[in-house]
Amino acid sequence: MLLAVGRLASQKDHGCLIDAFAILAPRFPDWTLRIVGEGDLRGQLERQIADRGLVERIELPGAIREIDAEYRKASLFVSPSKYESFGLATAESLLNGTPAVVFDDCPGTDALIENGVNGVLVDGRKGRAEALANALGRLMDAPQEIERLSQAGASRIREVYGLSKTLDAWESVLRDFAARC
């Protein structure tokens, strides 16, 4: 299963993901897409899914409380976002061992992914949906590659954003602030 998590809003570009999945669906009949979240674009996305004949393959379950279970059930996390302030859903996916596929021009998520180590960075400048479909298709054809990426995801995030690093950063900020007062 492919998983996306986020508000159903234009910045998240779930329409691009639906188009990419429509390209892949005939080749991968056992795969589904689950887009978790709620927002103003729900109706538009539901129509897009219906227009592409993918009602049985793409789920829009709304907001879900136990999101960690969703990450653990997924084979791949996909963020088609155009912009993220941090990329919390991407970080959560990696912490849960779900490799992420994101666009390389998306501030907030691109910094979380080390291309080919804990996920895949997609160059969407020549057609976002097609580029995303190509990247996803390569991984969907290679379960051993998904497993390899999965192994590195949590350790990389903990290394960069773990508690000790975060506490050190806050301590530095507080020291700097105290020195100015």
Image: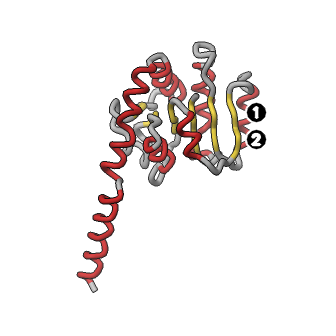
Residue 24: x and y, percent? 58, 19
Q: How many marks?
A: 2
> Does residue 169 appear left or right of residue 29 in this picture?
left
Q: Mark 2 to mark 1: distance in Å?
A: 6 Å
Q: Which residue is mark 1?
A: 47
Res. 102 visible in picture: no
**Front residue of 140 and 103:** 140
Give the residue at x 46% y 27%: 126
> Does residue 11 appear left or right of residue 38 in this picture?
left
Quadrant of image for the N terminus: top right
Give the residue at x 59% y 46%: 67
Residue 79 against residue 135 in the figure, above or below:
below
Q: Crowdedness of circle 1 by 10 Å Cα count: few (<14), some, many (20+)? A: few
The quarter of the picture where residue 29 lies is top right
Q: Crowdedness of circle 2 by 10 Å Cα count: few (<14), some, many (20+)? A: few
Quadrant of image for the C terminus: bottom left
Give the residue at x 74% y 22%: 53
Residue 33: x and y, percent? 62, 30
Q: Residue furthest left?
A: 179
**Front residue of 143 and 174:** 143
Q: Which residue is mark 2?
A: 43
Q: Secondary structure at mark 2?
A: helix
Which amino acid type is marked by label 1? Arg
**Front residue of 39 and 31:** 31
Q: Secondary structure at mark 1?
A: helix
**Front residue of 46 and 112:** 112
Q: Residue furthest bottom?
A: 181
> Does residue 154 appear left or right of residue 178 in this picture?
right
Q: Are marks 2 and 1 in contact (CB under 8 Å)?
A: yes
Which amino acid type is marked by label 2? Gly
Residue 109: x and y, percent? 43, 45
